[in-house]
Amino acid sequence: MTSDEHLPELRASDADRERVADILRDALAEGRLAMDEFEERLEETYRAKTYAQLEPLTRDLPAAGAAPAPREAAPAARPAAGWAGRVGGEATSRRGIAIMSGFQRKGAWTVPRRFTMFSFWGGGELDLREADFEAAEVEIRCISIMGGAHVILPPDMALEVRGIGIMGGFDHSQTGVPHAPGAPRVTLTGFAFWGGVGTSRKKTKAARRAEAEAAREQRRLAREERRLAREERRKRLE
């Protein structure tokens, strides 16, 4: 019985197919796959319906020895503020490659000292809001050729931009923002040719929910104070 027959015939999700596609793009960039092999496997990836069909496509590539495991429940969102305990540890991803396609890193992951984003006729998104960091100083190296990249930062993180653009550019609008004590410093470097590297700052959904809850509680307390004041006035008039 082949190893494929041992795999559960579970349906693969779009995220599962995209993880396999990322492995194939890394293999192409490292010279492990020729372009015709890459294109053939990528086409089979997006046609695959089950884990068993995905497994052979990365079996001979590093860090790919089996089909992607079904996703576990998403970890709880990190708090919007406070950096204690979020610096240190081993990086979980060191590069993202988009060749006529796209990639995304978000949620709970560990940013390395140096992360490389490469896009050619494609785009990538790096979301740092819920990430841990291997070190207090990290470099994100962006190479964008007729493509784009976007980095999402939390509101309280330090940012420096040093990238060079030719018929393209790097977004400097988020530099100079006051940062929280202990927050990592991110430096964007690299090269954009007919492409662009953008930045933005956003709060996490958990932080926005917490703020909305706090605002609702303040409104409730204000209404209660007004009600009590009305009752006190009524009692004095009786």
Image (cartoon, rainbow, N blue to C red):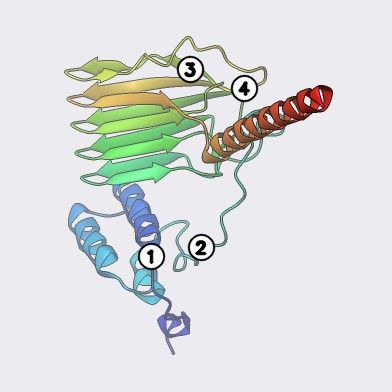
Q: Residue at x 83, y 22 (%)?
A: 236
Distance of label 3 from label 1 (alpha carbons): 35 Å
From the viewer's side, name the closer residue of 3 and 233. 233
Distance of label 2 from label 4 (alpha carbons): 30 Å
Q: Residue at x 24, y 44 (%)?
A: 99
Are circles 2 and 1 on residues that touch, CB within 8 Å? yes
Q: Please state the horizontal and vertical placement of residue 115, each as a whole percent of the image.
A: 45, 33
Disc nearer the start of the sequence (1/4):
1
Distance of label 3 from label 2 (alpha carbons): 32 Å
| Residue carrying label 4 | 183
Disc nearer the start of the sequence (2/1):
1
- Residue type at numbered disc 3: Leu
Are circles 3 and 2 on residues that touch, CB within 8 Å? no
Q: Quadrant of residue 68?
A: bottom left
- Residue type at numbered disc 2: Arg
Distance of label 4 from label 3 (alpha carbons): 10 Å
- Tell me if residue 145 can be seen: yes
Q: Residue at x 46, y 68 (%)?
A: 66
| Residue carrying label 1 | 13
Is 78 on the left or on the right of 227, as rendered? left
